[in-house]
Image: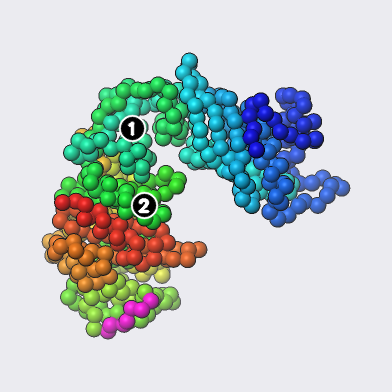
Amino acid sequence: MRIGVRTVIVGGVFAAMVGGAGYGTYNVVNALNDDGGPGPGTPAVKKGPPGAREVRDTAREFLTAWAKGDADTAAAYTNDQATAAQALTGFREDAHIRDVRLTRGTIRGTRVPFSVRATVAYEGRSERLAYSSEFEVVRGRSTGRPLVDWQASVVHPRLHEGESLETGKAPAPPIRAVDRNGRVLTAKEYPSLAPVLARLRASYGQKAGGRPGVELYVRRSSAEAGETLLTLAEGRAGTLRTTLSAAAQRAAEDAVARHPESSVVAVKPSTGEVLAVANHREDGFNAAFEGKLAPGSTMKIVTAAMLIDKGVAKAGGPAPCPATATWQSQTFHNIEGLAPDTGATLADSFARSCNTAFVKLVDEEPLTDASLAETARVNFGLGRDDWRTGIASADGSVPVSAGPDRAANAIGQGRVQLNPLNLASVTATAMTGSFRQPVLVPRSLIEGDLATARGLSPGTVAQVRQMMRRTAVAGTGARAMAGLGPDVGAKTGSAEVDGQARPNSWFTGYRGDVAAAAVAQEGGHGGDTAGPIVAAVLRSVR
């Protein structure tokens, strides 16, 4: 099925509705989309998913109106008429997209794929535009009519809620991003860097000394442009040096490519410089920096530091690992197959990732509901919302928690949320004893002060490193870290998530002056999927 500005495929009733023009046409179609419910004497509202004919007919009418440039009529075939009308009007007027031809693909149930062929024309310049997208046809809640389920991605798959397309002089000049050794970094060679490079350009394009060109781009807000989709006139790029390592970035890209919904970050503990950031995602979200997920047992690095600092436990001191542990009426279990060990030390329970040992220890004096949050904030710099990495990032959340969440937080469940950037920083602090806020660009380019934190005492560092090394050599991280040499450490984690068949896989490790952390959603236990990702990155840096 092909629909263009000169090709309109319609049938009986619809032809009559679009035979007129302007306000009358809009009102006729809008009446059918009224979500106020049926009037007296009208047939019962249909229920259940739309049938094949309803999906096909709705898709035809929606795509026909869109191709003709009739935004109001097309929007009336959606379940969010006002938003759709604004977006489709912007498609024509703000993005300057003309000669639109839409070709419907093979319908799969209620999902309708389609391709777009058009021309972007602006101030005497024009370029051809081609891409594919899709939408779903759903039933209106009160009218029962089949309607396009409106999402920003219907217009273009790179759009998210609140974003739009725009063509014109780019808000920022292009950049020529280079790694720490001057090697050029492009989204073509390193695809998961695309959102990172877009953010760097928005923030530092002017400072880098370039000149903006004319582009079709994603408008994220009044102050920020997102990804460039098409270039009509080249600008002049300014050079921006980053802290990245091309070798580490290559390894990170290749490693996350093996598992969907995975992310990894590597940092240089002695400086805080980010060496690699990679994501395997379809939505372009930089989850490695901005994600928020329960980190599972990798959180035990912070918990162990708290226990040692507060005098509750020592690496070689007792930390029995029973089969279960109960905290305020909630029972906690270990991973399947982990045998109890009543004579275990803290180092034993850390290396084997025993949940029950840590749950029992967080009940000891002088610990309070606020102790873990305090250690995370004061010693590791987490959860303070003051990290300035050079692009948007989240610096974790470890809230003060009472009740069962106090114990759950200690093993990385409950209300704790981190991302690979946060976890790599935690590992770097545990290695060196000093918190150095991660950065992606030279500090001279970052406005404002970097975040600071107290770090850890030499005695605590020595014990935590001892436990992490044991985990890497003979514990749950041994298989992933095999062959990486003697100066290594690791911690595994798996985090259960409601609705997922498998837990999220977490892993963090260090080798020499590199710390890396990864998460693979639904990747299983920590060493299964995230472990090899981290090991690949550590192996790449000499």
Q: Which residue is mark 1?
A: 201
Left-right relation of 33 to 67: right
The magenta stretch spans which residues?
A: 336-342
**Residues at circles 1 and 2 in contact by the CB criterion of under 8 Å:** no
Locate residue 120, reporting x and y percent: 50, 24
Q: Is residue 56 visible?
A: yes
Locate residue 188, reporting x and y percent: 35, 38
Neighbours of disc 1 within 10 Å: few (<14), some (14-19), many (20+): many
Residue 495 vertical placement versus 146 (above, below): below
What residue lies at 15% left-to-right and 56% top-to-bottom? 512
Locate residue 273, reporting x and y percent: 21, 45
What residue lies at 49% left-to-right and 39% top-to-bottom? 159
Q: Main secondary structure of the magenta part?
A: loop
Q: Under tag 1, what secondary structure?
A: helix
What residue lies at 45% left-to-right and 47% top-to-bottom? 282
- Quadrant including the N terminus: top right
The amino acid at mark 1 is: Arg
